[in-house]
Every structure is written in structure tokens, then in C-alpha cells.
Image: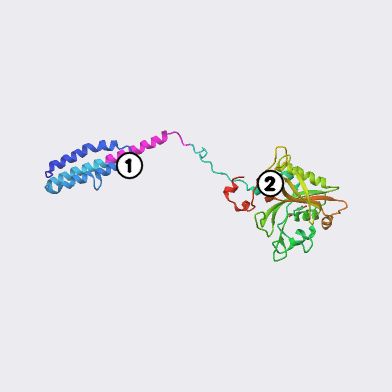
Amino acid sequence: MEAPTPASIERSLGELRAAFPKRFEAAATEQALRDENAKILGKKGELKAILGQMGSISADARKSIGALANDLKRDVEVAFDKRLQALARSSRDAELNAPPFDLTLPGRQLAPLGHAHPISIVRDEIVDVLESIGFAVHDGPELETEETNFTKLGFPPDHPATDMQDSFWTTDGRLLRTHTSNIQIRAMSSIPPPMAFIAPGVVYRRDDDATHSPMFHQVECFLVDRRVTVAHLKGVLGEFAERFFGSGTPVRLRPSYFPFVEPGAEVDVGCPFCKRPDGTRAGCSVCKRTGWMEILGCGMIHPVVFENCGIDPEQWTGFAFGMGVERVAMVRYGIPDIRLLFENDPRFLAQF
Ligand code: DAH
């Protein structure tokens, strides 16, 4: 290769001067423009390369070529700034002319909504049904006296339920209520009959297996009036089963013992899972082939309970029943293990 001369260097500068405006014009984006600018003026750019050839030329020639190079550099810089502004302007214009962005549009991806826990769903529905039949909601404490939780309900002092094994006692001799039947005592001791109440609430027992949880929910229901009979009790239970489990759901009472009722019974409803079109039950694994599922305990309020609350059992009679909300939820949905209701696994909860 021939050694560079002042003339050849000037020619190279002339070529670059002639070419750069078109190269800038061709850059369509800010990044392309900056890349092009770096190719010309950058540390390893074309201008540096041309000036690198000046080593062998005279000091005078170097001076005049240096001046040419400085002019060129300034012109390139001015053209770069101009083109940069033009690109910014046109991209802003494009944005302004684009269809407007509507900030009020709803998002495209639907956020999953939460919902009430199945225990709350079932409790609220039990309460709704009984309220619609005519019962009013009564409330009471979860920390209760032995007298109100047991004694006045007719539990003898040595009853196993009062045992350390079955209840959570505090050091001052009170306990976490083992059932919502305490509300019977509280209401009947403070309100003159007649009355018709339900009491939904949390109860506690020292129990923990597939069908028992140490903390669970009950709904108590009781009615006191003149000449109340088992027929009224059965009528309300039938109406409840009808409205809660669906029309035609049969109910049966099996004699049983609770200290605060006489007579007492346990109540079964026809299994919702193996119902035949004619209304009979086939028997299935959920109801253990019996066609029936137990949902609650009930009875006619014991005269001694009335006396303990200052109500004359010769004048007033009444019925009571109490159901476990988790139990009813398990019957309704065919849930095999009560613990599923307390684990809060979203894969389980999302099914309700
Ligand atoms: N309190 C009972 C329990 O916890 C349920 C119960 C049975 C409530 C009979 C009643 C009743 O009101 O009459 O198992």
C-alpha cells in the first residue's frame, strides 16, 4: 500500500463529509443514529482512523488537515443533534396520533376473587333458614362458667364431659364452652317466655381426629311457649331439612340421651348422595350404606332446666336442638375428613 499523502488524507476526509448526512438520514431510530455516530466519531471510528494516517506528513500539512478534521467533526456533531431531535419529535407525534390509551378500561386478566369459607357459607345458610322460620339470633360468651355450661343444664357433677379430659379449663375454674347450649341457660334466665332463639357460635373440646376438631361451630335452637310438643320440634326439623338439604329430604328421630332434654333424640336426614328418583336411598359409602346421616341432637327442654332458670315447667314447655356446623357441611358436601375444613388449602377451598 502506498504511504498516505496529505492529498489522500484530505480525500478521505472529503468522502466522509460527503457521506455522513445520508447515513444519519437513513438512521430510523435513536439507537441506529447513535450507532452510526459512534462509527464516525467514536474512539475506534472512521475519523480517528483517517487522522491516524498523519504520522508521516509534514507539520504544516498536519495543521491544515487538523483544521479540516475539526470542521468536519463539528458539522457531524451538529447534524447528529439535529437528527436526534427530529427522531424524538416524530416518535412523540406518532404517540400523539396513535389511538388513545383508555385508563378506565378494566384489566384483561381477571384477578381471582376470594369467597367465604365453607364453614361460614354453611353457618350463614343454617342461620338464614332458621331466621326465615321465625327464630331470632342470640349471642353469648365463649369463656363460660361451669354452672352455665354444665350444672344448670342438668349435667351431674361427675359427668365425664366435665372431666379434665374433655374440656379446656382456665386456672380460675371457668372453661371454654363445650357447646352452644349455654345460651339456653343465659336466655331463659334473663328473658321471660315465650321465646324462640338460635345461637350460632364457636365451641371447644379436647378432641382431634378425622371427625372431631378441638374448635368447631354449632348452632343452637330453642323455643319456649305454652303447650309446645314434640310435634312442633319435628315440624321445625322437617322444615329445616326441606329448606337446607332440598325438598323431600326425610328426617328421622332416634331416641338418645342428653341431660338437658326429656325425651331426647338424635336426628338423621336422608343421605343426599344416594337418593333415588323415587326418593328412597340406595346406600353409599358416604352414609356407610345406611341411607341416613346424623346431623344433630334434640329434645324437649327438661323441667329441671326450666326450674334452674326460674321458669315454671307447669306453665311452659319447649324444645331445643343443637347441630354441628362442620358436621352439616360434611354431610352436605360429602367431605370425608373434618381437618380439611381447617387446613385452608386453596385447592380445597376453591371448590365451594
Ligand atoms: N349440646 C349438644 C352437643 O353439644 C347438642 C344438643 C343436643 C343440643 C340436644 C340441644 C339438644 O339443644 O336438645 O352435643
Residue at the farthest bottom position? 171
Residue at image location 58% in from the left, 51% down from the top: 345
Is residue 173 shown left or right of residue 40?
right
Residue 267 location (% of width, % of height): 75, 49
**Which residue matches tag 2?**
124
Q: CA distance from mark 1 to mark 2?
A: 63 Å
Secondary structure character of the magenta stretch overall: helix
* Above or below, 37 relative to 209: above
Residue 117 location (% of width, % of height): 63, 48
Numbered range of the magenta stretch: 78-101
Residues packed near mark 1 inside 10 Å, few (<14), some (14 to 19) or many (20 plus): few
Is residue 89 shown left or right of residue 221?
left
User: Which of the 4 image quarters holds residue 13?
Assistant: top left
User: What is the tally of numbered marks visible in this picture?
Assistant: 2
Is residue 81 shown left or right of residue 7?
right
- Mark found first going from the N terminus, 1 or 2: 1
* Above or below, 8 relative to 174: above
Which colour scheme appears in the figure? rainbow
**Which residue matches tag 1?**
31
Q: Is residue 95 magenta?
A: yes
